[in-house]
Image: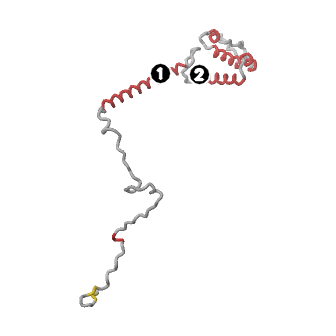
């Protein structure tokens, strides 16, 4: 005698009560628990949004913000491949604790590396002279004016400066076309 399968339409429908651990557990945050119950009551159809926000004393916009945050958190927790803890009181902090522990280990490793580098640097550099001479370095005076002392009016008075020309640039008399001889005749070169 084969047992006959029931259709879903023949099955008795019953409402799903709120989980007891959610209402009875004392270590959960009271505000968070009340918000979860509020959002679940509206999403399940138990209460309309207007009634829920009047009872809780929040604005409609704030309720929708809470609902969006709750649904996003559910999507992240129930996504395939998520490594969330299946226990009801898991807050998803295990992954965060693991990340922070790894970050601390990397920081400690970097600190050890920096200390070792400083030790080697101090060992290799000698503690020799730091300065090579005593006192401040001497000032190098550079004059913007030509050598020699000028009067205080030198910036307003302009003196003609003699121009020095090279000796080859001065004009010379052309050589004579002929050279006179003692006899009085001219000789052409």
For the point 66% across and 17% down, the residue is 35
Q: CA distance from mark 2 to mark 1?
A: 22 Å
Is 52 drawn above or below residue 188 in the view shown? Answer: above
By what rule are the colours in the image chosen?
Answer: secondary structure
For the point 25% across and 87% down, the residue is 181
Tag nearer the camera, 2 or 1: 1
Is 113 drawn above or below residue 9 in the view shown? Answer: below
Label 2 with label 1: CB-CB less than 8 Å: no
- Mark 2 vs mark 1: which is more N-terminal? 2
Spot occupied by residue 146 in the image (x, y as percentages of width and height): 39, 57
Regarding mark 1 in the picture, which secondary structure is present there? helix
Of 9 and 174, the residue lying toward us: 174
Residue corresponding to mark 2: 77
Is 155 drawn above or below residue 184 in the view shown? Answer: above
Spot occupied by residue 117 in the image (x, y as percentages of width and height): 36, 30
- Give the quarter of the image for residue 164: bottom left
The quadrant of the rendering that contains the N terminus is top right
Residue corresponding to mark 1: 101
Is 132 drawn above or below residue 160 in the view shown? Answer: above
Spot occupied by residue 31 in the image (x, y as percentages of width and height): 64, 15
The quadrant of the rendering that contains the C terminus is bottom left
For the point 67% across and 24% down, the residue is 65
Regarding mark 2 in the picture, which secondary structure is present there? helix
């Amino acid at each position: 005698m084969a047992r006959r399968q029931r259709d879903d339409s023949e099955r008795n429908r019953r409402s799903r009560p709120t989980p007891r651990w959610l209402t009875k557990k004392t270590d959960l945050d009271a505000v968070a628990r009340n918000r979860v119950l509020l959002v679940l009551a509206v999403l399940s159809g138990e209460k309309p949004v207007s009634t829920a926000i009047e009872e809780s004393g929040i604005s409609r916009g704030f309720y929708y913000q809470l609902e969006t945050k709750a649904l996003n958190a559910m999507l992240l927790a129930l996504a395939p491949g998520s490594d969330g803890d299946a226990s009801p009181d898991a807050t998803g902090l295990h992954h965060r604790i693991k990340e922070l522990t790894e970050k601390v280990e990397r920081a400690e490793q970097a600190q050890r590396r920096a200390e070792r580098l400083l030790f080697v640097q101090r060992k290799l550099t000698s503690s020799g002279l730091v300065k090579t001479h005593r006192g401040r370095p001497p000032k190098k005076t550079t004059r913007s004016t030509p050598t020699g002392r000028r009067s205080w009016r030198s910036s307003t008075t302009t003196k003609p400066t003699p121009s020095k020309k090279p000796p080859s640039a001065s004009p010379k008399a052309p050589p004579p076309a002929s050279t006179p001889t003692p006899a009085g005749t001219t000789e052409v070169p």
